[in-house]
Image (cartoon, rainbow, N blue to C red):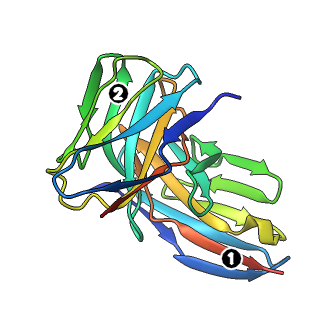
Amino acid sequence: DGGITQSPKYLFRKEGQNVTLSCEQNLNHDAMYWYRQDPGQGLRLIYYSQIVNDFQKGDIAEGYSVSREKKESFPLTVTSAQKNPTAFYLCASSIPGNQPQHFGDGTRLSIL
Amino acid sequence: EDQVTQSPEALRLQEGESSSLNCSYTVSGLRGLFWYRQDPGKGPEFLFTLYSAGEEKEKERLKATLTKKESFLHITAPKPEDSATYLCAVLEGKLIFGQGTTLQVKP
């Protein structure tokens, strides 16, 4: 079945550590996105990529980094510069145009 | 500033008790409005896309409608399995999400 796979489901970060969240899709979608979800808030856009080897900052990119070396993969690194990383992270993908985004099942990141 | 506001924040219904969820938006150039369902610990699941005022979409007990400034998600005779958080998102350049309405349907 086609879909978006995020791993791991749960992740713990130590002080000063960078961690990487994986996102893989087999939907053949060109565009991929990373969102952060906090209780009581709507999803907020961290980074997005419309094509391989290109990506743009979203609304809350500080403390995060991404790469897009393959169409299927869009990993997100939460760096030590992100001082409040505890959240539910969601990856999505879509085809170009005014089309819906489809989401993975998220990674919950917590601080040790 | 572009905004998407959902109401109510939480809704409790008895099984079979129909109701509506509201999504109001203030964006200058709407390119689409999307409804999603999100279960606890899961990613949002796509339900509907609406592109123009007057448009309606239906799926089982759910019906989504769109006007120039708001959208409604009507739930007819809900069942306990309809319990979830329903998210509205507006596309205007980027996707702008509302905070969601958490629906609980009691048997």
Q: Residue at x 30, y 64 (%)?
A: A112
Q: Residue at x 85, y 76 (%)?
A: B16
**Left or right: A23, with B84 as reference point:** left
Image location (x, y in percent) of residue B32: 51, 41
**Left or right: A107, with B45 as reference point:** left
Amino acid under disc 2: Ser
The residue marked by circle 1 belongs to what chain?
Answer: B
Q: Secondary structure at mark 1?
A: strand
> Label 1 vs label 2: CA separation?
36 Å
Image location (x, y in percent) of residue A63: 18, 47
Q: Residue at x 55, y 51 (%)?
A: B43
Against A90, residue B41 (above or below) is below
The quarter of the displayed image where residue B102 is located: bottom right
The foreground one among B12 and A46 is: A46
The disc label shown at residue B7, or none: none
Q: Residue at x 65, y 73 (%)?
A: B103
> Residue under circle 2?
A49
> Residue under circle 1?
B104
Against B39, residue A48 (above or below) is above
Amino acid under disc 1: Gln
